[in-house]
Amino acid sequence: MKKLFCMTLMILGMMSMAFAADAKGGIRGIVIDASSREALEFVNVAVREAGSDEFKSGCATDIEGRFLVENLKAGNYKVVISFVGYKSIERNVKVDNEVLNMGRIFIEEDAQQMREVQVTAQQSTMKFEIDKKVFNVGTDIASKGASATDILENIPSIEVDQEGAISLRGSSSVNVWINGKASGLTAENRGDILEQMPAENIERVEIITNPGAKYSAEGTAGIINIILKENARAGYYGSVQGGFNHHNGAPLAWNGSANINYNSGKFDFYASMGYRQRNHIRLVSVDRNNIDENGNVLSYLNQASEGLGKGENLFARAGMSYRPTKKDEFSIGGFGMLGSSYNNSPSLYESNMPGNFVSSERIANSNTEMLGGNVEFNYIHKFNGDDHKIDLLAAYNTFGHEGESIFEQTSIYANGDTTRSYQRQPSDVSPQNFDIQLDYTNKISETQKVEAGYKGSISRESSPTRTFSGLTAEDAKEDTKLYNDFTYNQDVHALYLSYSSQIDNFGYQLGLRGEYTYFETQSLGYGQDAASTPWYKNDYFGLFPTVFLTYRLTESDELQLNYTRRLQRPWGGQLNPFVNITDSSNISYGNPQLLPQYANAYEFNYIKTWKESQTLSISAYYRSTEDMVQHISYLDATPELGGKVMKSTYFNIGESRSIGGEIVSKNRLFKLLDLTSTLNMLYYELDGYEFTPVEGTTIEGKPESNFTWNARVIGNVLLPKEWSIQLRGDYRAKSLVAQGFRYPSWRVDWGVRKGFGDLSVSLNVRDIFNKFVHINHTEGSGFSQEAFHWHGGRRINMTVSYSFGNMKPKPHKHRHSEVSDYDSYSGGGHSHEE
């Protein structure tokens, strides 16, 4: 019944170029517990070449303890039998053009390993592949009771700011995927979606800084790919978790989740559900000085706010796979989330600007309901295992939200006058996305592979906005100046081709991807008719070459060099020309004429591994970006709003260059301490610019350059009796932001976990010292500003987890009374029995 496991691991053998098409030899046997004399299921059987120790093929034993490794060239091999909690054994064998029968193989329990296996399994691990870094986070202490956003904060190279904005190696131009697909995540909504996704659903995170031609060209900094849990072991198993978190000063929040998996030879099923509450306190202060040409302060406008945010959501995921034959697999799956959030944020303003208020109180309340999900269908046909196959995927995503925001403001002027205003702004955003993708893979020889494919992505988004204004809620009427109905449609079609080959220790992959983009936008004001209002339309085509070179110096030393060309398309909110004057002191609008920004990225990697669980990765990278999309702020004279106000919009301005280095080290010390250390250094250079956003206003951007760095250390201490402790330190040096810089910041996290067999209890504290804040300093024509953001500070999580079912491999009774009937398993051959 478990031939699927043998087939899967034999495919790995084929991918390692281990055998030729005309090979006929094989190895078979049965693995038995030396003490109980019971057959063992799921035992790993690896076949390595004698002398070089190169992996050739392998499989796992079935429910009868039997294994069969086929398609081996004639020669001498080493068979390695390994199983969790048992002592590994090795056997040297000689294979001819027949199936060698090793007979019954007895293995003994390893008492020390049985005691340590649970502690060892708690570690986060990391590995390096030709085009990505992989971080396994499924058993991280920090993941208990946390969100997907919290998990990303623990990954080297990734930064998440107080507003949930995600950046990779200092750049926010990054794509975030779920299970290798965009899954409806955009720059606008991904912060909300990831905050609602329980961390317990995440198995690993892949960092793809220079994606190959097979991947979308979107994201000049690369791709962050979140892989959700999906275990392939046969049987049924699951787990439940429950706990609470307490954000500094906010009410207690509860969370819980459960998952169940069932796998068999032809049918797999999984389902999970999680519930999360989120409560936090938020502090914001903005101090702005209006200055003359010599830097003298003319007037000021200061803002201070303290807000409470609450939220709760339900996250569910389910899927199934069916394999009617060894060559065909059908699967369907998806996830959905239902949530609500409430935010209350009173703000106090003080100003001495001529004609403006002296003081003002503004209270903002918002309620939002969110409903969204993803569903996908996948079909795989294998002509010759994973070496020659086609893969068809169709997916539909929607993440809409509906709610309203209420703003109440009372202002006092120098002459003693008082004004009051009330605004209610309902919103209903309903983005939809449909993807279809076809991938073809053909390993035409042991050292050559061709990949080709097509991807089409169709996006539709409508976001009508209405505003009702008055002195109070009772007399509020629709404000026609604040009405907007924005529609954004985008179609992207892509073709790619890549060829890879291996010549001794040298490997290379060459690829080319072409992407055609068409988009159209329509922004309707009050009373405008959609049929008679013109659309703004644009299209463009780009070619994106990729080159990957690898050279293995030794078995444990590898060099990598790669080049890719990438782009970042503007998103809906950046393109909407609607002038939002909801906050009369800060006006924002988009620019429908924005073009994508392009980047050329080069990267060099050196990877060194040691047998004692030590890994070192040294990377150097260079990225040049043209037609940068920048968020620009300027002071503009607006008499109807009381004089000069701050306006913000987006423009394609200038070019930038960044050169950096990254060191990632994974160390196991004294068999107790597991360390992951990251140092990222970046030098950034931005060209100066001068342009006129509106007549009579010229903005001059001075050339800027900055060296910044950040360091992160995560230590796991593995103690006896299923105790483990985790400590994490994070430091971010001063860095550039648009029109200014961000001050340094730091934080320390701590966690502890105790296991009781299938039960475990975890406690972790984020930002122990309550010091993690973001402070930005920006300057522009006629102003200087500092903004302080504090998003909840210290947070305590406690989670209790329980696992059930055959989560761990277990021995099974033999179906027959005697194990000596093994010869009926497959054809004859030589016998070797212990």
Image: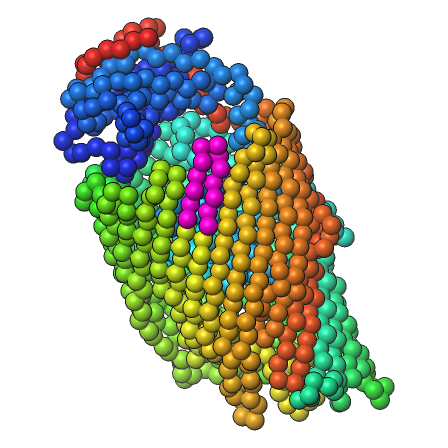
Q: Residue at x 24, y 33 (%)?
A: 18
Is residue 46 found left or right of 802 in the rendered image? left
Does the image show residue 210? yes
From the viewer's perspective, is residue 615 above or below residue 98?
Answer: below
From the viewer's perspective, is residue 67 above or below residue 242?
Answer: above
Q: Residue at x 27, y 8 (%)?
A: 821
Is 263 one of the magenta-colored residues? no
Measuring from the top left, give residue 200's x and y in whole percent: 55, 41
Predominant SS along the magenta part:
strand
Measuring from the top left, give residue 726's x and y in whole percent: 63, 39
Q: Quadrant of the N terminus?
A: top left
Q: Quadrant of residue 727?
A: top right
What range of the chain is rendered magenta?
A: 606-618
Q: Nearer the viewer, residue 67 or 195?
A: 67
Is 617 one of the magenta-colored residues? yes
Q: Nearer the viewer, residue 118 or 250?
A: 118
Q: Residue at x 55, y 81 (%)?
A: 701
